[in-house]
Image (cartoon, rainbow, N blue to C red):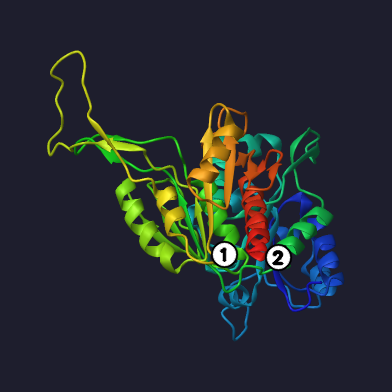
């Protein structure tokens, strides 16, 4: 199944290092080429000879091994994926903060292939705010996480921090490396995040969109072989590697970029949250308080999704979002027809786990002849479900 694929397996110095031997064994049974890189502390738990025997390859430990190749660059170039299992709190901190002081961290820094980590540590270390901040940073950068799980730990505690079992880690690696490139040759434009409608040089009107859903869709489309453009409002997210990034501020900015680029795009997914109205005028200086109330005169912004629906060319797929607080399905169905969209992704933002800023979502995919409610899942899984349906719609056109 993994013939022709190269997995660079990083092993750091945790008690779960012995489980990495099973990861290598399982990957070899799937005919993957496994190249193991270890920290010096990991060698205290498992001898490099064990990994050399299981992988059939040299094990790399030092940046200064006598070899004509520059080790971390060579490893990074050969990899289809880098997996670090176990990933200690120390390694996670290094990766999140750009520290490269040994072979495994320099290899990770040079890696252009996807990176997956399987954290393993004491519960208190996992729950430490510094570790949690580092994890959030890595997730925002697109690093994939497997675990940790709850269970019996080496310290005697029974709580979260246990490394996921090798079978699960290998399943995640396999799923990543064998994902069908069913969007190869397609151009996909995704919009994400909020817009800002300026009142004066200091203040603006906006909304709570974080852009996470749109960024997940862009990443998923990229992984499925599409050429992706991500038009993004101001968000606190790292750019998606391998995707053309276009930054915008206002709804008018978004309108100009999207309507121009849609002319040469196969699939448009409108996940951004543009403002329906903007201030009639923008003050050139900060507006001062002159009384107990303030009146704003607002004018409508262009309806971007409706314009895309009117301009939709032959074979083009248009997907819009409907974030609602009431009458979700009814409002979404109306939007489907009004915007001439091929699909509406509807979600009730008041539901636990489906609101703004989280890493999960719970949506209903609505087309003219179907309505499928999905369970609560990660935004990346929602992204793949959306793209699965887009492909089905495309094949039916």
Which quarter of the rendered picture does the C terminus lie within? bottom right
Residue 361 in which image quadrant: top right
Q: Nearer the viewer, residue 67 or 287?
A: 287
Q: Is residue 308 above or below residue 162?
A: below
For marks 1 and 2, the one nearer the N-term is: 2
Coordinates of residue 187 in the picture (x, y in percent): 51, 68
Coordinates of residue 22 in the picture (x, y in percent): 85, 61
Which quarter of the rendered picture does the N terminus lie within? bottom right
Q: Is residue 358 visible?
A: no
Q: Residue at x 35, y 58 (%)?
A: 257
Coordinates of residue 245 in the picture (x, y in percent): 42, 61
Circle 2 crowding by C-alpha within 10 Å: few under 14, some 14–19, many from 20: few
Disc 1/disc 2 C-alpha distance (Å):
11 Å
Residue 155 horizontal side relative to residue 63, left or right: right
The dot on residue 179 is: 2
Secondary structure category for the residue under label 2: loop
Q: Is residue 58 above or below residue 370?
A: below
Q: Residue furthest bottom?
A: 68
Q: Residue at x 78, y 77 (%)?
A: 3
Name the residue beneath numbered marker 1: 222
Q: Nearer the viewer, residue 362 or 58?
A: 362
Q: Is residue 49 above or below residue 158?
A: below
Q: Is residue 191 above or below residue 162?
A: below
């Amino acid at each position: 199944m993994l013939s022709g694929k190269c997995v660079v397996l990083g092993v750091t110095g945790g008690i779960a290092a012995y489980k990495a031997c099973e990861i290598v064994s399982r990957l070899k049974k799937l005919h993957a080429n496994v190249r193991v890189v270890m920290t010096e502390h990991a060698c205290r738990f498992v001898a490099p000879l064990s990994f050399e025997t299981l992988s059939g390859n040299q094990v790399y430990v030092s940046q200064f091994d006598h070899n004509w190749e520059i080790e971390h660059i060579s490893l990074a170039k050969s990899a289809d994926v880098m997996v670090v299992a176990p990933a200690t709190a120390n390694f996670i901190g290094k990766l999140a903060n750009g520290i490269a002081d040994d072979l495994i961290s320099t290899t990770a820094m040079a890696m252009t292939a996807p990176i997956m980590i399987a954290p393993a540590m004491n519960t208190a270390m996992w729950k430490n705010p510094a570790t949690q901040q580092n994890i959030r940073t890595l997730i925002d950068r697109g690093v994939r996480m497997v675990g940790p799980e709850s269970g019996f730990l080496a310290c005697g505690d029974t709580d979260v921090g246990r490394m996921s079992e090798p079978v699960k880690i290998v399943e995640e690696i396999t799923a990543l490396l064998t994902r069908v490139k069913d969007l190869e040759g397609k151009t996909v434009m995704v919009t994400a995040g909020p817009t800002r409608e300026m009142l004066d040089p200091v203040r603006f009107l906006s909304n709570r969109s974080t852009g996470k859903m749109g960024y997940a869709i862009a990443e998923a489309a990229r992984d499925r072989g599409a050429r992706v453009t991500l038009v993004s409002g101001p968000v606190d997210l790292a750019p998606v590697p391998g995707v053309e990034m276009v930054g915008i501020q206002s709804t008018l900015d978004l309108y100009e970029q999207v309507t121009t680029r849609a002319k040469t795009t196969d699939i448009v997914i409108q996940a951004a949250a543009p403002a329906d109205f903007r201030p009639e005028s923008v003050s050139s200086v900060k507006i001062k308080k002159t009384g107990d109330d303030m009146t704003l005169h607002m004018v409508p912004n262009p309806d971007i999704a409706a314009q895309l629906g009117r301009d939709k060319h032959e074979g083009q797929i248009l997907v819009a979002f409907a974030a609602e607080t009431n009458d979700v399905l009814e409002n979404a169905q109306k939007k489907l027809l009004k915007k001439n969209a091929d699909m509406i992704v509807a979600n009730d933002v008041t539901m636990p786990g489906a609101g703004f800023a989280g890493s999960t979502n719970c949506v209903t995919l609505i087309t003219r002849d179907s309505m499928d409610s999905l369970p609560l899942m990660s935004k990346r899984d929602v992204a793949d479900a959306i793209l699965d349906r887009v492909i089905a719609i495309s094949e039916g056109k």
